[in-house]
Image: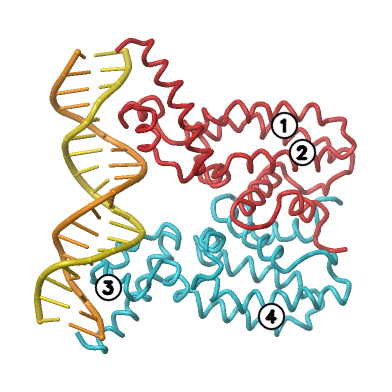
Chain colours: A cyan, B red, C yellow, D orange
Amino acid sequence: MSREDARRNRARLIEVAAEVFAEVGADAASMNDIARRAGVGPGTLWRHFPNKDALIAEVVGTSLDALAALATDLRDHPDFLREWLTALVTHITQHRGLAARLTHAPTDGPLSTRCHPVEQATADLVARARTQGMVRPDLTPAELIHLATAIAWITETTPATPPRLTTLLFDGLTP
Amino acid sequence: MSREDARRNRARLIEVAAEVFAEVGADAASMNDIARRAGVGPGTLWRHFPNKDALIAEVVGTSLDALAALATDLRDHPDFLREWLTALVTHITQHRGLAARLTHAPTDGPLSTRCHPVEQATADLVARARTQGMVRPDLTPAELIHLATAIAWITETTPATPPRLTTLLFDGLTP
DNA sequence: ACCTGAACACCGTTCAAGT
DNA sequence: ACCTGAACACCGTTCAAGT
């Protein structure tokens, strides 16, 4: 088959994957199922994307970039760190199963690579918050991301809501 | 076979399950693998325990009870709510894969049932903390458990440590 | 009464064989 | 160059057949 067909296959696979992820979650989705629904053999899917994370990275990549871009808009917001934490949680929550995938993704894998801009943005905002005394000085950017991921995850399967848990975390449990 | 054999099989299955859970985590552990290692057919495992949660409940049940019992010891501790949160997180962390199982367990299933004493203890301590003004008055016991589970979960697959995240949650992110 | 293990429909993943 | 789909070793789960 031609390179043209290959390109179409690739585009179609991403499209179908996005559908399946939305239906059952990125973690629960089956590679065979995605290939089947795209009308393609499993082998074709696996050569276009060497592992599931690569496929996920392609599906959520552009929205991760959009999230990172939002960070610059937030820089001058009076409560930007809280806003950023909210944005992180919201974004992860919008892609069911992504939280579980993020925490298991190897550091040098495609998904982690795609997250780099968001990590960078988080580092910037935490540093900025620190110079302004808006945040406890020992908080690391990685910790903020871990906590955002944890909140997004627990939200997927319990009645707890992201804004509420975000508030509890940000302000603490004491009065 | 005799009822005697059945009882021995059951005990052996719980024993082996505990081993496998410790090795690969309760979530990743395979039912077939447990049956195989116990020298028993899959069917035998499934009749003794109608689903995986029932098996998990049996394995972690006694330690859940011990956790609940700890709550009464804590009642007079000056910082008992923080201690309790720490105990919750510590306990879940000690059983890898338990966090994921807890959040997906059906409310009327065997695992949720086994968690009842811990939920009860949490409700008591939160209520007590509230009357003493030690905690924000809108915090619900369920929220505390959800957050403890989330922290235990994120801890399994990242360099983040339970005591640190517990502190961040309890005290909040602001200085 | 209790156990066995073959069986079913899946999964991720690979790779010879086709165009 | 790219695709196919059978194949392998697994998984959860069931159930006829055995003692």
For label 4, count other residues whose C-alpha is less than 10 Å away and answer few (under 14), some (14-19) or many (20+): many
Left or right of B75 on screen, residue A67: left
Q: Where does the image place residue C15, in percent across and percent down from the top left? A: 22, 66
Q: Between tags 4 and 3, which lies in front?
A: 3
Do discs 4 and 3 belong to a common subunit?
yes
Read off the chain for label 2.
B
Read off the chain for label 4.
A
For label 2, count other residues whose C-alpha is less than 10 Å away and answer few (under 14), some (14-19) or many (20+): many
Q: Where does the image place residue B131, in percent across and percent down from the top left? A: 87, 38
**Cα separation between marks 3 and 2:** 52 Å
**Residue B31 vertical placement versus D16 (above, below):** below
What secondary structure is marked by label 3?
Answer: helix
Contact (CB < 8 A) between labels 3 and 2?
no
Q: What is the total number of numbered labels drawn onto the structure image? A: 4
For label 3, count other residues whose C-alpha is less than 10 Å away and answer few (under 14), some (14-19) or many (20+): some
**Residue B24 vertical placement versus B48 (above, below):** below
Read off the chain for label 3.
A
Choose the circle earlier in sequence order: 4 or 3.
Answer: 3
Give amino acid for label 3.
Thr
User: Which residue carries the number 4 mark?
Assistant: A71
For label 1, count other residues whose C-alpha is less than 10 Å away and answer few (under 14), some (14-19) or many (20+): some
**Cα separation between marks 2 and 1:** 9 Å
Image point 63% across, 40% down: which residue? Answer: B94
Give amino acid for label 4.
Ala
Do discs 3 and 1 belong to a common subunit?
no
Contact (CB < 8 A) between labels 3 and 1?
no
User: Which residue carries the number 3 mark?
Assistant: A44
User: Which residue carries the number 1 mark?
Assistant: B121
Do discs 4 and 1 belong to a common subunit?
no
